[in-house]
């Protein structure tokens, strides 16, 4: 008879002793016909297709940390599920999308799908930021509201506790601001088209808009704005904060300049 301790220890590595094969978690079933591996964290699950056990254990640990961050911001329990396909093509097929250009991971159907090549090129801090960003999409939902608020909020959560200075996290935008260029408006939905020339800067502008709101009105106010914006237009969603879109835009432009020029507090 296999002891409970042995079963739990083996399950962490994606196998169950005394069985004909791995006892797959429900979240792992139906992904691939064979070569499925998995690892548990404290509250997370990482599932891979021919993925090394060391990678899955590392992802599960990182997902645990990301889950704690997201849960603290949203004030709700989060159980991360991270899927690691064997290739970019597999990732695109699982996500049901044609192109993953510029993406290291994405949120899809209640889980985070890792894009293997791009994700592997990230620094450890970058991996943590990306996992928290995508897990925020999973936990908070991506329906409704302007794209800048959805993506900026996910980046706001992603960068919490990263230790990255603003000028480093927004390096491309800082270069523009340093040369005297500042956007006149908040990012439009169309600015987020994959391959757009200012895509990095647009994400950074969105992050700083959300960082401004959290810093000025409190993190809970940012979460509540995110929720309100899902069911109404931005102007209506901003009213409880005493803001209009033009007022927020003006505050944001000043904030971007202050944060990304010499003398900004980073």
Image (spheres, rainbow, N blue to C red):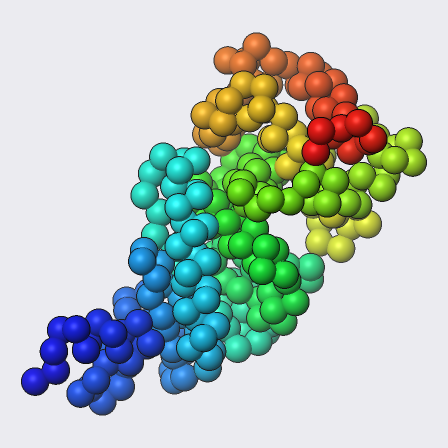
Residue lying at 50% horizontally and 30% vertically, measured from the top left: 226
- Tell me where residue 261 sits by quadrant: top right
As drawn, is 151 to the left or to the right of 252? left
Residue lying at 61% horizontally and 13% vertically, measured from the top left: 243
| Quadrant (top left, top right, bottom left, bottom right) of the C terminus | top right
| Residue 258 image point, x, y percent | 77, 25
Q: Residue furthest top?
A: 242
| Residue 95 image point, x, y percent | 51, 62
Q: Between residues 38 and 160, which one lies in front from this camera angle?
A: 160
Q: Between residues 164 and 153, which one lies in front from this camera angle?
A: 164
- Tell me where residue 2 sits by quadrant: bottom left
Residue lying at 88% horizontally and 35% vertically, measured from the top left: 178
Height in image: 44 above or below 17? Answer: above
Height in image: 84 above or below 180? Answer: below
| Quadrant (top left, top right, bottom left, bottom right) of the N terminus | bottom left
Q: Residue furthest left?
A: 1
As drawn, is 243 to the left or to the right of 12? right
Residue lying at 28% horizontally and 80% vertically, measured from the top left: 15
Residue 93 visible in rendering: no
| Residue 170 image point, x, y percent | 73, 42
Height in image: 99 above or below 49? Answer: above
Height in image: 97 above or below 10? Answer: above
As drawn, is 264 to the left or to the right of 119? right
Residue 132 visible in rendering: yes
């Amino acid at each position: 008879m296999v002891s409970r301790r042995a079963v739990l220890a083996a399950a962490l590595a994606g196998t169950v002793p005394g069985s004909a094969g791995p006892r797959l978690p429900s979240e792992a079933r139906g992904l691939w016909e064979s070569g499925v591996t998995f690892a548990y964290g404290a509250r997370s699950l990482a599932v891979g297709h021919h993925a090394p056990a060391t990678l899955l254990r590392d992802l599960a640990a990182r997902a645990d940390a990301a889950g704690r961050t997201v849960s603290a911001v949203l004030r709700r329990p989060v159980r991360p599920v991270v899927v690691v396909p064997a290739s970019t093509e597999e990732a695109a097929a699982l996500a049901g999308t044609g192109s993953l250009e510029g993406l290291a991971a994405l949120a899809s159907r209640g889980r985070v799908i890792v894009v293997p090549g791009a994700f592997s090129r990230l620094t450890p801090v970058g991996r943590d930021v990306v996992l928290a960003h995508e897990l925020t999409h999973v936990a908070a939902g991506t329906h409704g509201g302007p794209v800048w608020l959805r993506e900026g909020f996910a980046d706001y959560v992603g960068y919490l506790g990263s230790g990255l200075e603003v000028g480093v996290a927004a390096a491309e935008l800082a270069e523009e601001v340093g040369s005297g260029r500042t956007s006149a408006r908040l990012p439009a939905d169309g600015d987020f088209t994959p391959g757009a020339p200012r895509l990095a800067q647009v994400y950074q502008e969105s992050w700083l808009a959300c960082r401004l709101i959290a810093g000025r009105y409190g993190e809970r106010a940012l979460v509540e704005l995110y929720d309100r914006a899902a069911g109404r237009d931005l102007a209506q969603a901003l009213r409880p904060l005493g803001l209009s879109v033009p007022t927020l835009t003006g505050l944001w432009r000043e904030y971007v300049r202050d944060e990304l020029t010499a003398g900004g507090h980073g």
